[in-house]
Image (tube, rainbow, N blue to C red):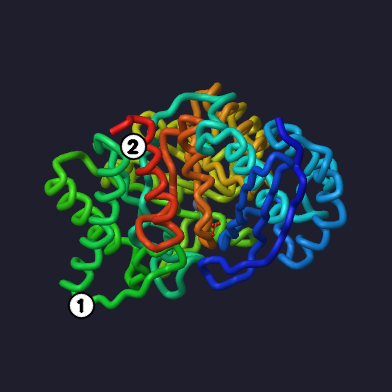
Amino acid sequence: MTLVSEVRLRQILDSRGNRTVEADVRTESGGFGRAAAPSGASTGEYEAIELDPSEAIASAREHAVPRLEGKVFVGDQRDVDRTLRAADGTDDFSEIGANSAVAISMAAAKAAADVLGAPLYQHLGGAFRGEESPTPLGNVVGGGEHAADATAIQEFLSVPVGAPNVQDAVFANAAVHREVHDLLADRDIAAGKGDEGAWAPSIDDEEAFEIVQAATDSVADDFGFEIRFGLDVAAAEMYDEDDEEYVYRDTTRSTDEQIEYVAELVDEYDLAYVEDPLDEDDYEGFAELTEKVGDRTLVCGDDLFVTNVKRLETGIEQGAANSILVKPNQIGTLSDAVDAVELAVENGYQPVISHRSGETEDTTIAHLAVATGAPYIKTGAVGGERTAKLNELIRIEQNVSRL
Ligand code: PGA
Ligand code: ZN
C-alpha cells in the first residue's frame, strides 16, 4: 500500500482532434500511472457529465487533488473512487467532470499496478474474475453521429465468434475491414472513414448489410472460423420524441415497426449482437425485443444503461436486454464500471467493455476486459487509438498463456 504523492492534470488531444483530460498519478514509493478520458459523440442522456476539459481540470484541482495527495492509498481502488465521488459531491460528476474523474481513477489503478510490478489487468483482476480473452467487436461500416451522410445505423460490427484466440480475432476484424473496402471499390462506391475508423460510405443500410455479410463470409472462409456480425443501431439518435418514431434515411418506423424490423434483421442476417435497437427510455421495447430474439442474439444496452447499476437494475426487473455496454467514462470511475459488470454477470447479462468514438492511446479498457473476464470488447478494427487496445489485448493474451 502506498500513498498518492502527486496528481497532475493536463489537456491533450483525442482522436477527433478535441481536447481531453489526461491524469498522471505518482505514489510516495515512486509508482507512476497515466491515463486519459475518452469522449462520446452519440452520448446517452443519462451519462455522467463530461465538462469542458479546462473547467474539469480546474475543478478537480480544487476539489479532488487535495483529498488524494498524501491521503489515499493507490492500492485501494475503491477508496480512490469513493474519494473522487466525495470530492465531487454530485451523483453525476457534474462538479469535477466525469472526464477528470475517470482519468484520475484509471491513472491511480495504473500507479498501483506499477507499484506492484504487475500488469494492470492483474491488479484489477485481483478482486475480480479470471484471465480469459474477450472477443473483439470490430466496427467496419458506420454512420449515424460518427459520420455525415452515411448509413443510418451507427455501426456494423464484425464478430469473430469462432476465433481460437484474440490475436486471430483481431486480425480477422481487420481483414473484414479491408474486404469491405474492396467490395465498396468493386461497386465504385467512394468511402472515407468515420470517427472510429469504420468505412462511412453514402449508402443505405440495406446495401451495407449486403456488403458486410459478403465481407464476413469471405474472411470466415479465408481464416477458417465462424465470423458473424452485429449492429449498434444507436436508436436514441434517430428517435423523434414528438412524432414517436425512428427516422431513417428514407423512411420512418413506429416503435412496434422498429421492434419487428430489428427482429427480422436478426434472423435474416443471423446477427450475433444488436446494441441500442430502441430509444434510451424504452425499457419496455427492449424487453419486448429481448423476449423475441434474446435466445439467439445479444441485445445490448448502451445509452439505455449508461454503465449505471441503478438503470441496469431497472432493466433486469423488466427483462430489458441481455447484455450491457460498459464504458468507464459514462459513470466516472473504474469501481463503478466493475460494479456494473458484476451486477450484469450475476443476472446473466453479458458485459461488453467499450471504447468511445473519441479515444486516445490509453489501453485501460483492454485490461479491464481481461480483469473482469468480460466475453466481449468493442474497440474498433483499425486506427492507432483503436489498435492501441487491440495490440494490448494480443500482448496480454501472450502474457497470460505464456506463449
Ligand atoms: P459514442 O459512440 O462513443 O460516440 O457514444 C459509441 C457507441 O454508441 O457505442
Ligand atoms: Zn452504442
Q: Earlier in the sequence, mark 1 or mark 2?
A: 1
Q: Residue at x 63, y 42 (%)?
A: 111
Q: Nearer the viewer, residue 283 or 139?
A: 139
Which image quadrant is residue 358 in?
bottom right
Label 1: few (<14), some (14–19) or many (≥20) C-alpha neighbours in 10 Å: few
Q: Which residue is mark 2?
A: 398
Q: Residues within 10 Å of mark 2 (few under 14, many from 20)?
A: few
Residue 257 in sight from this viewpoint:
no
Query: Could you tell me which quadrant the C terminus lies in?
Result: top left
Q: Outermost residue toward the top?
A: 346
Mark 1 lies within 8 Å of ligand 1 (Cβ measured):
no
Label 1: which residue? Answer: 188
Judged from the image, the secondary structure of the residue bearing numbered disc 1 is: loop
From the viewer's side, name the closer residue of 105 and 403.
403
254 with respect to 51 (left or right) = left
- Tag 2, which secondary structure? helix
From the top left corner, tell me how far across and down residue 114 is, in percent: 58, 40
Is the residue 185 above or below the residue 344 in the image?
below
Nearer the viewer's eye, disc 1 or disc 2?
2
